[in-house]
Image: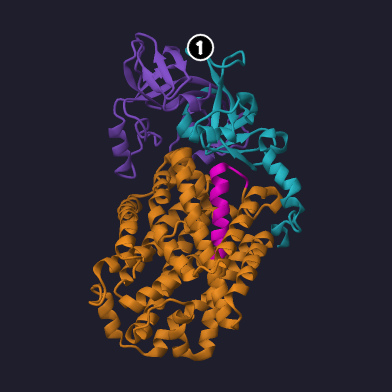
Chain colours: A cyan, B purple, C orange
Amino acid sequence: MTRERLVDARLHLLSRQVLDADGEPVRAVDDLELTGPDGQEARPGEAAQVGAILVGPTLFTRLFGGAVPASRLPRIAWSDVAHVGTAIELSVRSDELDADWVELWLRDHVVGRLPGGRHDAEADG
Amino acid sequence: MNVGDLLDARVEEPDGTRVGVVVDVRFALAVTEPEDGDGGSGGEGGEEDRENPDEPLSEHTAARDEVGAARLVGLLVSPRSGGSFLGYERTDVRSPWPIPQLVRRRHRGTFLVDWADVAEVRTAGEPVVVRLVGGYERRSPAL
Amino acid sequence: MKKVMGAALGILTAIGGFVDIGDLVTNAVVGSRFGLSLAWVVVVGVVGICLFASMAGRVAAVSGRATFEIVRERLGPRAAGANLVASFAINLLTLTAEIGGIALALHLASSVEPRLWIPVAGLAVWLVLWRVKFEVMENVAGLMGLLLVGFAVAPFLLGPDWGELMRQAVPPSPPGTEHVATYWYYAVALFGAAMTPYEVFFFSSGAVEERWTAKDLATNRVNVLIGFPLGGLLSLSIAACAAVVLLPAGIEVSALSQIVLPVAQAGGPLLLAVVIVGIVAATFGAALETALSSGYSLAQYLGWSWGTFRRPAHAARFHLTMIVAVLLGVGILMTSVDPVMVTEMSVVFSAVALPLTYVPILVVANDPQYMGRYVNGRVVNALGTVYLVIVLVAAVAAIPLMIATGAGS
C-alpha cells in the first residue's frame, strides 16, 4: 500500500544523519537538490521533486555564501534513499558512493596505515 | 535549484509587496507499507499505526516502510524572519513551556503556499526572491 | 550482572567527568577562600547535571541519536556551527587542562619535571583511545578514580570543628574578607565545572557506543542518580579539606601540591599516595572523555562515522580529530602555560556555552517524533525550565563577572 507522508525540509530532512545500508554514517544532509520530472533543473510552479541529497562543500556555501558549480557537488541520488526517520537510511553501501571519498582516502592512506589502525578493540573481549 | 536557495528567501506578491520569508519547504513523501506478516513490530499496519504518537520515530521506521519520491508541495511563509526551525507553529507540541508558546506567537500568520502558485524564483543576488502568482492561496501550515 | 556493569558508565562520568581537574582546582580554590559558603552551588550543579545527562542518555537510547547530531538537527547548520566552534574550543581547553593535570600529579609522585611528563601523558591518552575497548576504558579509569575517596576520609582524620563548617555552609554568605562580585564569580565557575557540556556529549555518545535501547533506560537512571551525586560528594570533600586546613592558614591555592596538602597532613604519605593515584586516574579518565568529546562533536555535526566500537580505519576522520586535539593540547602545555590557570578559564567559558547545548536537549526530549511515549514528564520539564533560567543567568553573568573581578583575584 502506498500513501503520502508530509515532511518539512528543515524539520525532517536537512541536517539529519545519513546512514548507509549497513547502518554506517555517511554524512549529514547539507542540502537537497530539486529536479523536474525530466531530471532537469526544477522550474517555478511546475512539478518538482527531490533529486539528490547534497553533502560537503554545499554546507560552507550555505553558511558563508558563494557557490560551487552544481556538477562538482558530491551528491547521493534520492532513489538510493530507503527510509526516512530520525536518520535517513540508504539502500546502498557507503563504499559505492563517491560522496564519501575523503573518509575512504584517509582510511587507505593515513589512519589505516598507522600501526593498529585496523585493529578491532571490540574483538579483545 | 536547491532547498537551501529557497530557505530564507524573500517572498513577494506580483506587484513586489513583501509578504514574508520562506521558513521551510514542504514535501510529500511516497511511502510503501511493508508487506503484511513481514515480522514488523506493529501488526496492524495502516494509517493509525503510522501516526501513533506513542511510538518513537525510530521504532516505526523499524517497521521498514520504503520511501519513494519526495514531491515538492509548497513553501511555508512566515511574516517574521528567523527562528522557525523548531516548527512549533506547525505541530501541536506544547512542552517544554514556554519555548513552543513563544515560537508560535512569533510565527503567527505563517501559511503554506502551493508550489504551483510560485511564478518566479530569482536566485541571482541576495536575498533570493520568490514571486507568487496573482490570486495565490494562503493554506494552513499544519502538518 | 549486565546492569551492575552498566552502572560503571555513570561512575566514570561521575569521577572522571564530575571530579576532573576543573572540579579539583575550583573546589580547592573556593574552599581555601570561601570555606563551605559556596557548597550550595555544588548541590545545584549536581541536580542540574543529573537532569540533563539523564535526558541526553534517554534521547540517545530511544532515538539512537547522540547529542551533537541533535544540536545540529534542531538548531540548523548556522547556530549549531557556532555552538560547535565554542564547544570544541572549550573541549580543547579542558583537554589541555586534564593532560596538564596528569603531568602535575605524576610530577608530585615522581619529582620528575612536569614538562617531561606532558608528552608521555599525551601519548598514553592517545594509545588508550586508539587501542582500548570503550567499556574497559571507563571501568578501569572509573574504579581507580574511586581512590579520590581519600579526600572524603581526610576531614574525619583532621577532626575539624564541624559546627563551624556547618555555619559556613548554611545559610550561605560570603566571608567578610571577600568582595560580593568575587563570591558570585566563583559561584559561576563552580556551576560551570559541575555542568561542563562535554559530559553530556560523552554520556550520550557513550550510550550509542554501548548500543543502548529503550530497555536500558532504568540503567541510565541508576547511573546518573548514583554516579553524579557521588561525584558531587567528592567535590564537596575537596572543598572541605581546603576549608579546614588552607583557609585558617591563609594559603591561596595556586598549585596542585597545595590541593593535596590537607590530605598529607591528615593521613600521611600513604593517604597522599592513594589520593595522587586517584587524581591521575580521574584526570586521565577526563582527558579520555574530553578527547573523545572533541571527536564526537565534530563528527556528529558533519555526519562522519565515529565511535571507538569501530576500527580506527572505519572512523578515520574521528580518530584523526582526536589525534589533532591531543597534539594541540600537548603543544599548548609545552609553551609552559600554567595548567591551573587554563583550568580556571575553561570552567568559566563552559558556563557561557551551557545554553547552546542544554536548550536543544530539552527541546528534543519533548519531541514526540523522536521520543514517542518516552517524552519528558511534567516534573522533569518544570525542573528543566528552572535550570534553563539558571544556565542563562550564569552564561550572561560569566564574562562581566570575570572582567569586574579580574578573574577572581
| Camera-nearest residue between C230 and B46 | C230
The chain that hosts pointer 1 is: A
Q: In this view, does B83 lie to the left or right of A48?
A: left
What residue do we see at 61% from left, 26% from top?
A78
Q: Is residue C276 visible?
A: yes
| In the depicted structure, whether residue B132 falls above or below residue B110 | above
What residue would you read off at disc 1? A46
Pinpoint residue C102: horizontal percent, then vertical percent.
Answer: 56, 72
Find the magenta span and give its range.
Answer: C286-305
Question: Dot 1 surroundings within 10 Å: few (below 14), some, or many (20 or more)?
Answer: some
* Circle 1: element type: loop
Pinpoint residue B124: horizontal percent, then vertical percent.
Answer: 48, 20
What residue do we see at 36% from left, 19% from top?
B139
What residue do we see at 66% from left, 34% from top?
A99
Pinpoint residue C169: horizontal percent, then vertical percent.
Answer: 28, 75
The N terminus of chain A: image quadrant: top right
Q: Can residue C212 be seen in this view?
A: no
Q: What residue type is labelled 1?
A: Glu
Residue C303 on the magenta segment: yes
| Camera-nearest residue between C34 and C358 | C34
Picture mark count: 1
